[in-house]
Amino acid sequence: MQFVTTLLPCLIEAVDKSIEANAEQVTALDQAIGDGDHVINLQRGIKALAAQSGELAQLDWPKAWQKIGMTMMMTVGGASGSLFGTLFIAMSKAAQSAGFVSGADQVLNLEGFANIFSDGVEAVKHRGKSDVGEKTMLDVLIPVAASLRKDAVDTIGLAEVLANVAMVAIRGMESTKAMLATKGRASFLEERSLGHIDAGAKTSQLIICALVSVLEDRLTAPS
Ligand code: ADP
Ligand code: MG
């Protein structure tokens, strides 16, 4: 399997379906400790990406991530819109500075992707002035970035890398339940934020697991 942008329509469709299927659950989470709009915000962004997916598939990775980031920024809104937007725009910048330029080699390798994704996550930390343990999407994104970097060095097979990513994403999402929110709207609730999973951590996990499933299917599909 080659990791190329022509996979994007399929990846976006899988994310759309997963968020749709879990929309009620995520809304209930965001109603418990936020203002309940997280899924609607995110779905607006995903629909906008679905409408652009043919165009995205023609771009190289830096241009595609830039466009995805801008679309998320402009359509999602809320705290999550600027944070998800920042993730993709920073990934685009990292890919460009790593010499991953337009028209050149469009196929991503694991080590390259692990570094690019990690730079994206660093930018989210900076933008949100937050870190792991604060009951946000970063409790999923940070461990996933670390898992990718570790597995790139250990050079295990892609199937195992993907399985690890899904496992770490689920564990990170679940870890937010016992955390006290110190960032975002949920922090206003102080101790009352305990005992609820963070909505942004849940959608980040769902997105990552949807992407992993598509890639796993491609790995096992006869070529
Ligand atoms: P809003 O809180 O503005 O209504 P959303 O409901 O779309 O925005 O998104 C809320 C999610 O954004 C939270 O569940 C959390 O995961 C994430 N979030 C909020 N603030 C921060 C922050 N400072 N750093 C990282 N993630 C954050
Ligand atoms: Mg909200």
Image: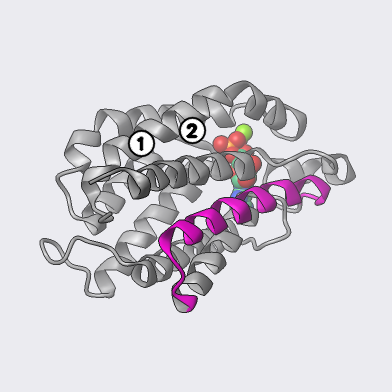
Can you name the residue that lies furthest to the left here? Answer: 103
Query: Dot 2, how many residues are within 10 Å of its Cα: few (below 14), some (14-19), or many (20+)?
Result: many
Q: Which residues are the magenta region?
A: 154-181
Query: Dot 1, how many residues are within 10 Å of its Cα: few (below 14), some (14-19), or many (20+)?
Result: many
Residue type, label 1: Ile
Task: Identify the mark at residue 42; answer none if there is no mark.
Answer: 2
Res 201 quadrant in image = top right
- How far across and down, in percent of the image, does residue 99 sit? 22, 74
The quarter of the picture showing ligand 1: top right
Q: Is residue 170 magenta?
A: yes
Res 147 quadrant in image = bottom right
Q: Is residue 129 left or right of residue 83?
A: right
Q: Secondary structure at mark 1?
A: helix
- How far across and down, in percent of the image, does residue 126 sit? 54, 64
In contact (CB < 8 Å): disc 2 and disc 1? no
Q: Is residue 93 left or right of residue 42?
A: left
Can residue 105 be seen here? yes
Kindly report the secondary structure that dominates the magenta region of the rendered protein.
Answer: helix
Say which of marks 2 and 1 sits in front: 1
Task: Identify the mark at residue 12; answer none if there is no mark.
Answer: 1
User: At 14% from the left edge and 62% from the top edge, which residue is drawn?
Assistant: 102
Q: Is residue 210 left or right of residue 61?
A: right
User: At 28% from the left edge and 54% from the top edge, which residue is drawn?
Assistant: 1
Q: Secondary structure at mark 2?
A: helix
Q: Earlier in the sequence, mark 2 or mark 1?
A: 1
CA separation in Å, label 2 and label 1: 12 Å
How many numbered callouts? 2
Q: Is residue 150 magenta?
A: no
**Front residue (pair 182, 68):** 68
Up the image or down, 154 lies above or below 37; here it is below
Residue type, label 2: Leu
Up the image or down, 14 lies above or below 142; here it is above
